[in-house]
Structure formats: C-alpha cells, structure tokens
Amino acid sequence: MKAITVYCGSADHVHVDYLSAARDAGRFLAAQGIAVIYGGGKTGLMGELAEGALEAGGQVIGVIVESMNTAALAHQRLTRLEVLPTMHQRKSRLYELSDGFIALPGGFGTFDELFETLTWGQIGLHAKPVGLLNIRNYYAPLMAALRHARQEGFVFQEHIQAICLADTPATLLEDMRQHEHPHDAVKRWMRED
C-alpha cells in the first residue's frame, strides 16, 4: 500500500490518548513510506495525524470542501491540499487517492465516511482493506453492534470479518496487508451466485 485514507475526528477536547495515538499513527505511516490522505483539517485527531506524518517526513494530502477551507479549520502546511465543492466529491476523491482506509476515533463525520466505505466494499465497488485503530477500545461498542446486526440477519459474517481491528498501527497495517476481500459474500449480497 502506497497511500491510506485516514478518517478521524476534528474535536480538540478529547482524551489526550486519542490525540497522541493519532500523531503516532501519522508518524508510523510516514515511516512505512505510506502517504497519508485525510480530510485536510488542522484540529483534533486530524491535525495530530497530519503533524505526526509531516514530522516523520511523510507525504500528507488533504482533501477539504470549500466551506471548511478556512484559517481556523484547514491545515496549511500539507504536501498538497485539494479543495472541492461538495462532501460527496470530497469522499469520492479520498477513495480515489488511497489503497486502503483506516478509521481512528471520531464522531458523525468519521462514522459516515467509515460506513460509506464499508458499504461500497459490501456491494463490490471496491476491494480495498478497511481498518479500525481501536484506541482506548473505542470501537468495541461498534463491533458489538455489528455482531448484533449479524445475529439479526442484516449483515454477512464475511463482511464483519473483513474489517481489520487492532490496537496499534503496526498490527493494523499488517492485518490490512493480508486482507482478502469477501468476493463470494459480495456475490451473495448482490444475488449474483
């Protein structure tokens, strides 16, 4: 993988462990020679991620919408900052630029991006790995909800198993590198079998 899109929160007033882990993740990806693609912000985990990657000499590409391209929100020292008119175009561009996706902790925006990416994989629009960096066990409740959805028949087990989940960037990246997309489950989901 040469480039990974990272979804994460922009809130500043969160536990310091989330902020430091985001910075560490940026450093780690840069040290692996992986370009960090993200939403272009300078606050919260987004800013820490970018700073970590830049400190390690990495390439950081931000993709932001016009309404958020302000001095208060946009990171101005990136390798490149792309400004697009709409959120749909932004998400599509984040997808185009990357070989995989990682979600760090975040709120509605992070969940929106994560679930759209998972849905696109579920219906076969991509076969790229999707990983969750489980800082402070943040994603345990989400995984429990997904298992519940599986038990109730709304999700295939293969799609849940395809989500990489780890507590450290190194373990997560290794799992993502070994990712095998559940093509047969996609065919069943799309009723192509």
Image (tube, rainbow, N blue to C red):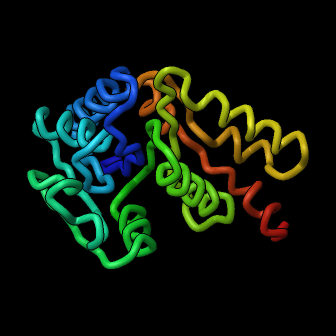
In this rendering, is residue 146 above or below 15?
Answer: below
Task: Check the image and name the residue furthest to the right.
Answer: 152
**Closer-to-camera residue (181/69):** 69
In the displayed structure, would residue 44 be above or below residue 134?
below
- Residue 172: percent from left, percent from top: 46, 30
Residue 31, image x, y percentages: 21, 32
Q: Is residue 14 left or right of residue 191?
A: left
Quadrant location of residue 25? top left
Of residue 175 and residue 89, the one placed in the foreground of this image is 89
Q: Residue at x 17, y 52 (%)?
A: 75
Please state if 35 lies on the left or on the right of 143 as rendered.
left
**Residue 89 located left or right of residue 162:** left
**Which residue corresponds to the image point at 37% horizontal and 69% vertical from the top-left?**
90
At 62% from the left and 50% from the top, the residue drawn is 181
Quarter in which the C terminus is drawn: bottom right
The image quarter in which residue 68 lies: bottom left
* Residue 97: % across, % down: 33, 62
Q: Residue at x 52, y 46 (%)?
A: 130
Front residue (pair 192, 75) = 75
How many badges with numbers are in the image? 0
Q: Is residue 45 above or below residue 89?
A: above
Residue 14 horizontal/vertical position (percent): 39, 30
